[in-house]
Image: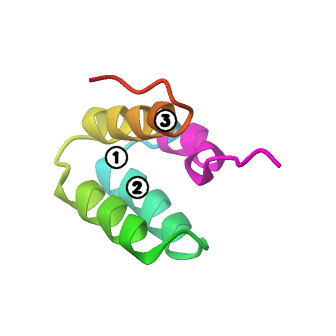
Amino acid sequence: MKFKSTLKQITSEVFSATTLTEGKLIVNNHIGGTGIKDTDKKTILRNVNNINELGKLQYYICNSLLKFEGLGLI
């Protein structure tokens, strides 16, 4: 069984967001309702809520997705 990143499901929505608030809301709503480990969930939500620009949020989502796929950047 190949696991799929839960972030892949919302990547296009986050990139379509027009404001940081909208992008954070998309991530928060999605992550809150997933079955991922609580420690990972808390880390993602903490990191997302500390971001202060939409572009940085989109960058974080991309890097997180790449890391899950084993293609993360240093």
Q: Which residue is mark 2?
A: 22
Q: Is residue 69 magenta?
A: no
Q: Are marks 2 and 1 in contact (CB under 8 Å)?
A: yes
Q: Quadrant of the C terminus?
A: top left
Q: Residue at x 61, y 73 (%)?
A: 35
Q: Residue at x 25, y 64 (%)?
A: 46
Q: How many marks?
A: 3
Q: Which mark is residue 19?
A: 1
Task: Note whether 10 is above or below 49 in the view shown.
Answer: above
Magenta-highlighted residues: 1-14
Q: What residue is pinned by disc 3?
A: 15
The alpha-carbon separation of the residues under discs 3 and 2 comes to 10 Å
Q: Is residue 8 above or below residue 46?
A: above
Q: Is residue 25 left or right of residue 51?
A: right
The residue under label 3 is which amino acid type? Answer: Phe
- Packing grade of label 1 (10 A; few <14, some 14-19, many >=20) is some
Residue type at the position of mark 1: Thr
Q: Is residue 2 magenta?
A: yes
- Residue drawn at x 25%, y 56% is 47
